[in-house]
Image (spheres, grey):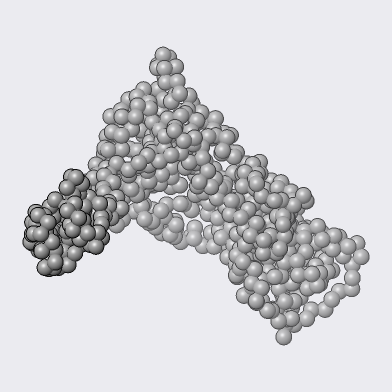
Amino acid sequence: MSQQGPPSPPPPPEGSGQGGRSPSASSPGWPKWSLYVLLAAFLGIIILAVSSGDSTGSEISYSKFRDAVQDDRVASIEFDNASAKITGEYTDGKEFRTTGFREAPQEIISLAEEHDVDLKPKTQGPSFIETWFPLLLPFAFFGFLLWMLNRRASGQMGNIMSIGRSKAKTYSTERPGTTFADVAGYEGVKVEITEVVDFLKHPEKFGQIGARIPKGILLVGPPGTGKTLIARAVAGEAGVPFLSVSGSDFMEMFVGVGASRVRDLFQTAKKMGRAIIFIDEIDSIGRKRGAGLGGGHDEREQTLNQMLNEMDGFEATEGIVMMAATNRPDILDPALLRPGRFDRQVVVPLPEMSERLAILGVHTKGKSLSPDLDLNVVARGTPGMSGAELSNLVNEAALHAVRQGRQQIGNEDFEYARDRVLMGARRESMALSDAEKELTAYHEAGHAVCATLLENADPLHKVTILPIGMALGVTQQLPAEDRHSYNQNYLEDSIVVAMGGRVAEQLVFGVMTTGAGNDLEVSTNRARRMVTEWGMSPKVGPQAWGGSGQVFLGEDLMHQSRDSYSGRMANIIDEEVERILREAEERCRTVLTENRGGLNMVARSLLEHETIDGATVKRLVAMAAADPAPAVESTSVD
């Protein structure tokens, strides 16, 4: 049997309402493309140097050049015997160039002498680049290599020198951030935290009357309830910079780094004037000092001490508010929670039904929903779910709708998603024998009949004999409304419902199976808590022997051990737990014996349909009570 526990509210998607992040303070260094630019410039210089020897003047053919010499139109020529290039000047002052042969032909020499042409032979040696480039290339390569190594080393030194800087991300007002409108539900939390927004917007109002705003606000709540989102919404509403950092960002392998980062964080906030410093998971650095078990952690304690000093070092009127979030307020150091530091705690609890409905509305916005989908039913069927779990529930329902080829998300998709989130995926490949299926049907029918007939039990939602998660079958009960406390009648009836599967197996088949293992575990724990923690035993009386001490804190290591009370009291506790369980078993046996016809009809309906809802179970039990069938003899399991 599976009973729906109380779930929690999902933090909105990480990307929604996020402000802009400030650029990193570290030096960006040279871009990667700069190397290619330098290489291109170097090649360009070589090309220019090689082509710089070209002379000006018009290019003519060698034949025209010879004809010009014969016509006495050439005043002078210069012959380069290395490149066979001939440059010259006409008698009218114009220049020309042409290409001859490696060695000047005797014909040209004779023509030049015959026509009084000034002949200037030129023997050109190798250029500077041709001579020195092959020698300079290795030196340039090794120089570039040394430069790269030096640059890398200086970058590493820069990282080491900046290791004490804070890693806080800055969300400024340049990009719109999250506001309270983006946070579904939690109206009470918003009201409690609104005065922080008013202080950051209009600090003069508080200064005139002499009021002092709390220096630190601690958001406390289970994981996934949106504590970080609420802190970001405060910054968005106030329109001030928001410095966000995780508690683990202060810890490093080097001694003193955490304290240095705390100092840098507060200095950065003071330069901004008005700002919010938000530390997520503050319990990672704010744990109790000298806890005992496992020894201390000097670096963590130094970081905590520095944070305490910094919080004492700024006035409340400076416009800096510290906010922190944790789901473990019990392990925080008392010095961190005293007045003048984190002197206000805002509880962010699991959402109520109306808040779950609002959260579901946020996460289903923009999705194609079936017209018959009732989000009120979904919200009622998800008690105890956080916002993150509700977000996951909506996503699982959408995925199931796509896998089934539907265009809209319907009730069936949310039913599947809830089963998957709470108990695991359905094991389609698991095949039960007929005997196992019949045994499972009567087991779940026993739970269902008891849940239907007992006055104080939660209403029955559905029963299935399809294997889900680790269970061969599931009986789901959904509370009509959220419960915040449980009376003794409710607890006793819940134990009777848990016994229904085991008692049904005994009545019908005369055997006991391992299928009731989880039912017995849940029943025993509940009965023991009734006796040891909630004072619901006449013999034990108003005494509490339970506790929630954490072993890793070095406190209450043996808190729940029997050494904390006498052997006589231990015997009384054991007797009372056994009495509660025995009485619940007898009540369950009486209910199922008197409604044996209803048990049989529900089991047969499960064998036929595999899944039936609570209304069907109620109708079958009522039909059997109105027209009782002949008693069915007990059978045995093959």
Foreground residue among 443 and 401? 401
Vertical relation: 563 (above or below) 271: below
Foreground residue among 41 and 563? 41
Q: Is residue 330 visible?
A: no
- Horizontally, residue 215 falls left or right of residue 438, namely left
- Residue 434 image point, x, y percent: 74, 81
Which residue is at the far top? Answer: 208
- Residue 502 image point, x, y percent: 68, 70
Q: Quadrant of residue 23?
A: top left
- Horizontally, residue 343 falls left or right of residue 546, namely left
User: In the rendered view of the protein, which quadrant contains the C terminus?
Assistant: bottom right
- Residue 212 image point, x, y percent: 40, 22
Residue at the location (71% across, 73% down)?
440
- Horizontally, residue 595 falls left or right of residue 175, namely right
* Total marks placed: 0
- Horizontally, residue 337 falls left or right of residue 504, namely left
User: In the rendered view of the protein, which quadrant contains the N terminus?
Assistant: bottom right
Which residue is at the far bottom? Answer: 638
Vertical relation: 494 (above or below) 273: below
Foreground residue among 499 and 351? 351
Residue at the location (35% across, 26% down)?
273
Vertical relation: 321 (above or below) 89: above
Residue at the location (49% across, 49% down)?
223
Residue at the location (89% across, 73% down)?
630
- Residue 266 image point, x, y percent: 30, 34
Q: Quadrant of residue 64?
A: bottom left
Q: Is residue 120 visible?
A: yes
